[in-house]
Amino acid sequence: AGHVRFEDLRFGYEPGQPILKGISLDVAAGQTLAVVGPSGAGKSTLARLMYRFYDPDGGRITIDGQDIAEVTQGSLRAAIGIVPQDTVLFNDTIGYNIAYGREGASEAEIEAAARGAAIAGFIERQPDGYATRVGERGLKLSGGEKQRVAIARTLLKDPPILILDEATSALDSRTEADILETLRGVEQGRTTIVIAHRLSTIVHADQIVVLEGGRVAERGTHAELLRRG
Ligand code: ADP
Ligand code: ADP
């Protein structure tokens, strides 16, 4: 499961001001698509349409052949995990933030998610059952730690489709490299759409598209795009 298609997708926030001008993409289940391009090209807009923060003006998005306009919000959310650029956390424990929205999750599941996101090291079991670094609350975490909490949250949800919307763009390059390594593991077996602006962060993608002015300007593998300059 997790075959994603964008079919001639068109969208604008304001009438007469198209942002996406007919985007067609096909991502096989389990593959990684990278979307790069200059700021303002419409990359995040593409992600917002996938999650149905907005609906398209034309064309459609399908998951396993089904138009996402026809699936319930609940099953769409279950199918897609998003790691945004800046994760906003509640001023509560790390465990609370990981489990938010998944109140039925067990302690073992939360710990497994934390391990997958490589934050298990600073989590301790508390008498009240919440996993947390002692005294540490969401707001105190570094940018990289916040992203790891978002990754853990996604692992707990275990969606077939993962969207990384500039998930490491706000981090320094050392932290970015560490988190990219963690993300490689999280991407395994999931259809992944990586939105980025640095080509170096998406070398592993099966398919790269360059979005410019709301259109696909280039597509190919990393090697193909480098060859073409
Ligand atoms: P990218 O992610 O490639 O930087 P975006 O998808 O964020 O691009 O934005 C594409 C265009 O849509 C930009 O011109 C941006 O100003 C505009 N835009 C983004 N969000 C909104 C919004 N909520 N309302 C109106 N215009 C928006
Ligand atoms: P759940 O996974 O419990 O269904 P939500 O549907 O509220 O949670 O959010 C799913 C993911 O989308 C979360 O990781 C959240 O950070 C992200 N998200 C929510 N709103 C936005 C937004 N406006 N822009 C980018 N990402 C968002």
Image (cartoon, rainbow, N blue to C red):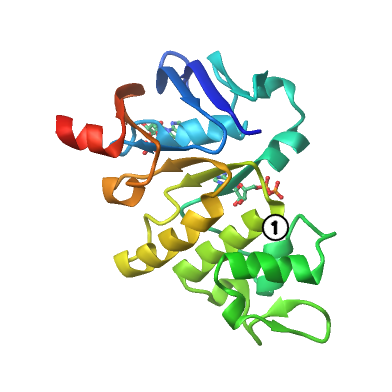
* Residue 13 is at least partly visible in this image: no
Q: Residue 193: where, in percent of width, then height?
A: 48, 39
Q: Position of residue 148 (x, y in %)?
A: 54, 65
In the rendered structure, the answer to whether residue 205 lies left or right of residue 198 reads right
Q: Position of residue 70 (x, y in %)?
A: 73, 20
**Quadrant of the image where one finds ligand 1:** top left
Please tell me which residue is depicted at 66% across the width and 33% down the height of the picture. Answer: 1
Task: Depth check: give the residue in front, 82 or 186.
Answer: 186
Q: Which residue is mark 1?
A: 156
Which residue occupies 24% across, 32% down?
Answer: 224
Q: Is residue 142 visible?
A: yes
On the image, which quarter does residue 101 sit in?
Answer: bottom right
Query: 134 or 27: nearer the eye?
Result: 27
Q: Is residue 149 above or below residue 224?
A: below
The amino acid on which the numbered mark 1 sits, given as a three-letter code, is: Leu
Classify residue 75 as left or right of residue 115.
right
Q: Secondary structure at mark 1?
A: helix
Query: Percent from the top left, x then y, of residue 153?
Result: 65, 58
